[in-house]
Amino acid sequence: MKFASLESTMGAVGRFGARLGRLAGGRNTALGVLGGALLGLSALAPAHAAATKTIRIAFIDPLSGPFGSVGIIDAKGFEFMIDKINKSGELGDYKLKLVLFDNKVNPAISQVDAEKAADEGIRYILQGNGSNVAFALANWVKKHNKLHPDAKMLYLNYAAIDPGLSNSDCGFYHFNFDANVNMKMAGLVSYIAKQKDIKKVFLINMDYSFGHSVANAAKIMLKAERPDIQIVGDMFTPIGQTKDYTPFIYKIKQSGAQAVVTGNWGADMSLLAKAAGQAGLQGVQFYTFYAGIPGTPQAIGDAGAGRVMQITPWVGSVKSAESEDATAFQKAYDDNWYYGSQLYLTGMLAKAIKEAGSADPTQVALHLEGMHYQTPVGDVYMRADNNAIVMPMYLSMLEKGTPPAGTPPAGTPTQKGTDLYWKMVKRIPAIKMMLPTSCQMVRPAGAVLANAYFNNTGK
């Protein structure tokens, strides 16, 4: 089925709302006006609905504002994976449905959205953009579940990666499906440490919990791996408010840095990259978490070829079944696949529901804990000690030109509208991502750890 392509126009946003409305049938709550296009989710239920047990999932992420484009591409990815699972029939009588909430990356709005979802009988929350939002939702879920023991909520976090979320603020009903800041920074630093020409590093991040955790991890790990490297800049910019990064690019120039490390994402990453290109910043490598989010490579442009690196759970030049999903996704949406964590999250959720034989959040959580999930690119594990995923990670470099034959596979050779592609530089095995945790979560009475052999043996 060919879905509508999502563009930045309000008309396209409206079509996306209509498409996901058909997935989330029966919900009439307004999601807010997106530039004049109201995203409603009322729709006719399918003829077989009476025999189908519907599991609704509240997607609480930005669909408007400076980070709206990121939330929309994420929603497309989940729509794609949910549609695939539903069509496969692997859940039997169960069907998954995505219900959209536009939180504008605002913690207070997100908690209100979670309350609305709970009032509508939704028991699953899906969120990923903004660790500030994630902390708010994680704590809201703890309070809600304590007050409503018969209507518990399960929070599935696919991209908010402040380390505190799987350490100090961990919880039994909160699962992390992306590598946290420390894990990703360890991967980046392992590569930077081997680049002997790098003597000076400039840090620039967004001014909230996530950005500060990125900067702190970089300083600690660089000092441990390469004590000779100087940190010549450590700057923070207001999240979603910086419209021109040119002054910061000039500071990077003046610092003499050979490398920039940044956790910026969305508009803050695109605008940083755009300013670097326009200012003609030469000879500086960018080490990033989120340069691959659709739209950012286009903003980076040709000037970033051979100079911009990212660390991700998956990259297009890895030929696998995930590449087949990427190809199918591009054909359906005319856009690039990005989040490998979406495949892991939906696949592991489906497996947990199937094994539990239930959609009850507690039963599903017990089957997620300690889960061993096999994927085409390596085994994935959900740690039972902190409910955080451990998976292979990939370092990739933005390159220009024709990719080597067969990588990436036909159908996804370049980033949309460019002749740029991500070339895999290094694969980091899952075991290398296994870092200590301080999590002391409280589990339901009588609960025991699910299959936790990975935690005990490291296999």
Image (spheres, rainbow, N blue to C red):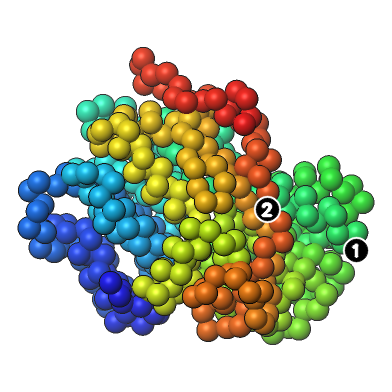
- Residue nearest the observer in this picture, 292 or 83: 83
Task: Give the image quarter of residue 429.
Answer: top right
Q: Indicate which disc, 2 or 1, sits on the residue closer to the N terminus.
A: 1
Marks 2,1: beta carbons within 8 A:
no
Callout 2, which amino acid?
Answer: Arg
Specify the quadrant of the image occupied by residue 390: top right
Q: Name the residue furthest top.
A: 446
Kindly state the secondary structure of the residue where label 2 is placed. Answer: strand
Q: Residue 50: image x %, image y %?
A: 7, 48
* Disc 1, SS: loop
Along the line of sight, which residue is nearer the eye, 444 or 448? 448
The residue lying at 41 percent from left, 34 percent from top is 368
Q: Residues within 10 Å of mark 2 (few under 14, many from 20)?
A: some
On screen, 329 above or below 391?
A: below
Tell which of 334 and 307 is nearer to you: 334
Q: Quadrant of residue 35?
A: bottom left
Residue type beneath disc 1: Asp
Picture residue at 26% right of the left edge, 33% below the top: 357
Q: Is residue 459 above or below residue 253?
A: above
Q: How many marks?
A: 2
Q: Residue at x 46, y 34 (%)?
A: 371
Q: Residues within 10 Å of mark 1 (few under 14, many from 20)?
A: few
Q: Residue 401 in the image: x percent, y percent? A: 67, 82
Q: CA distance from mark 2 to mark 1?
A: 22 Å
* Quadrant holding the N terminus: bottom left
Specify the label residue 197 is tagged with.
1
The spot of residue 433 in percent (x, y) is 65, 41
Quadrant (top left/top right/bottom left/bottom right) for the C terminus: top right
Residue 225 or residue 45, whichever sits in front? 45
Q: Which residue is mark 2?
A: 427
- Residue 387 lies left or right of residue 251; in this view the side is left
